[in-house]
Image (cartoon, rainbow, N blue to C red):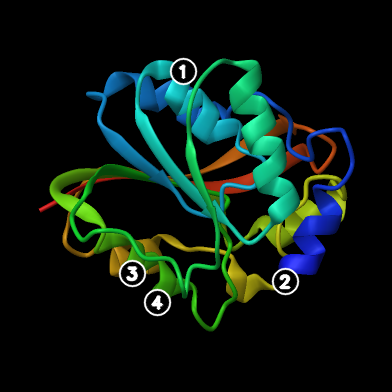
Amino acid sequence: MNKEYWDERYARSEYAYGEAPNVFIEETLPNYPIGRILFPADGEGRNSVYAAKLGWTVSAFDLSDTGKQKAMDLATAFDVTIDYEVSGAEEINYELESFDAIAFVFAHFPAAVKQQYNKKMLDFLKPGGLVFFEAFGKDHIEYQKKYPSIGGPKDVDMLFSKEELMDSFADFEVILLEVVEQTLNEGPFHQGVGSVIRFIGRKK
């Protein structure tokens, strides 16, 4: 899934995953102190705009120029400001230990580099900072057979297990780690029931 893939997906006027924030982010982010937050692979900005509405100072990045444009349009509609860069995870660079939180929302990087990219993002997080993470779990492939509109990678190696997250976030205090069956109603590309894995942790 390269830049051209995502530019094409985000080219339509409709928001591919809706304009409302991810339910997990909406339910959990307001429970923690406001600060500076990073959204990797932010797409059309629904989650970063939501965080900005709560008062967070928001940075985000994604491969897609069309994704950025729609994110900026959404920010304008809600009269908030987000700092959004068009970049891949391998090139992105922020000041070390400069964020109070990082939110990975269905940030499914290529299998060969996903652990490397996730760990790179953690260098940007302050000690004591928080990670919010939601992605599709390893058994999501079975749900895709029943719910073809649920979306998500079809390569099981791009999906996540609890063991992988415990490796990626080995130096974190675990606040939440669960795999749940979740009904998604997020635009045309996340419709149906899927398997999601969720994590909240605090960097030691």
Upstream in the sequence, badge 1 or badge 4?
Answer: 1
Upstream in the sequence, badge 1 or badge 3?
Answer: 1
Mark 4 lies on a secondary structure that is: helix
Spatial distance from mark 3 to mark 2, Cα to Cα? 20 Å
Residue bearing the label numbered 1: 53
Upstream in the sequence, badge 3 or badge 2?
Answer: 2
Spatial distance from mark 3 to mark 4, Cα to Cα? 6 Å
Q: How crowded is mark 1: few (under 14 residues within 10 Å), some or many (20 or more)?
A: some
Q: For this view, does 76 lie left or right of residue 5? A: left
Task: Look at 20% across and 61% down and name the residue there.
Answer: 96
Upstream in the sequence, badge 1 or badge 2?
Answer: 2
Q: Do the residues labelled 1 and 2 touch (CB within 8 Å)?
A: no
* Residue 24 spot, x, y in % from top left: 49, 31
Residue bearing the label numbered 4: 116
Is 157 situated above or below 139? Answer: below
Residue bearing the label numbered 2: 2
The amino acid on which the numbered mark 3 sits, given as a three-letter code, is Lys
Count of labels shown?
4
* Residue 26 spot, x, y in % from top left: 49, 23
Q: Is residue 23 visible?
A: yes
Mark 2 lies on a secondary structure that is: loop
Quarter of the picture holding the N terminus: bottom right
Task: Look at 64% across and 47% down and name the residue there.
Answer: 43
* Residue 91 spot, x, y in % from top left: 46, 73
The amino acid on which the numbered mark 2 sits, given as a three-letter code, is Asn
Q: For this view, does 143 lie left or right of residue 112? A: right
Q: Which mark is residue 120?
A: 3
